[in-house]
Amino acid sequence: MAEENGFLQSVEEAVRSRPQAPAYRAADGTTMAYGELWKLSDAIAAELAARTDDREPVVVWGTRHRSWWPVSWAA
């Protein structure tokens, strides 16, 4: 899907070129580097694939922790 998604292409490029750079900074000051964001989103994507038998899932993600929103988008 990455080849069809400009957002994912941008994140993948940042992971390769500068994995320690901040991917985002939440309002509470929490930051996450591109490498960490990619690792966590990959884990979520793998879990979704395992639970859906490789079907295209429709996911509604809700969390009180807004810092996880970019991770779920990348998944």
Image (spheres, rainbow, N blue to C red):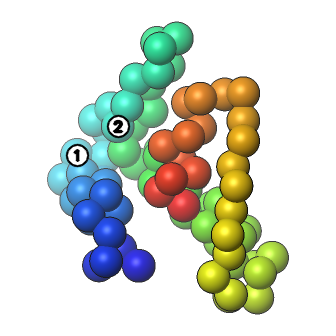
**Residue type beneath disc 1:** Arg
Residue 11 figure quarter: bottom left
Dot 1: element: loop
Image check: 7 left or right of 37?
Answer: left
Q: Position of residue 20 (x, y in %)?
A: 32, 38
The mark found on residue 23 in the picture is: 2
Q: Earlier in the sequence, mark 2 or mark 1?
A: 1
Q: Residue lying furthest left in this view?
A: 17
Name the residue rendered at 72%, 41% in the picture: 62
Q: Is residue 51 above or below residue 25?
A: below
Image check: 14 left or right of 60?
Answer: left
Name the residue rendered at 28%, 35% in the picture: 21
- Label 2: few (<14), some or many (≥20) within 10 Å? some
Image check: 56 left or right of 18?
Answer: right
Q: Which residue is mark 1?
A: 18
Dot 2: element: strand
Instruction: Pick whichever, 56 or 21, lies toward us.
Output: 56
Q: Is residue 26 above or below residue 60?
A: above
Is any part of residue 13 visible from this angle?
Answer: yes
The mark found on residue 37 in the picture is: none
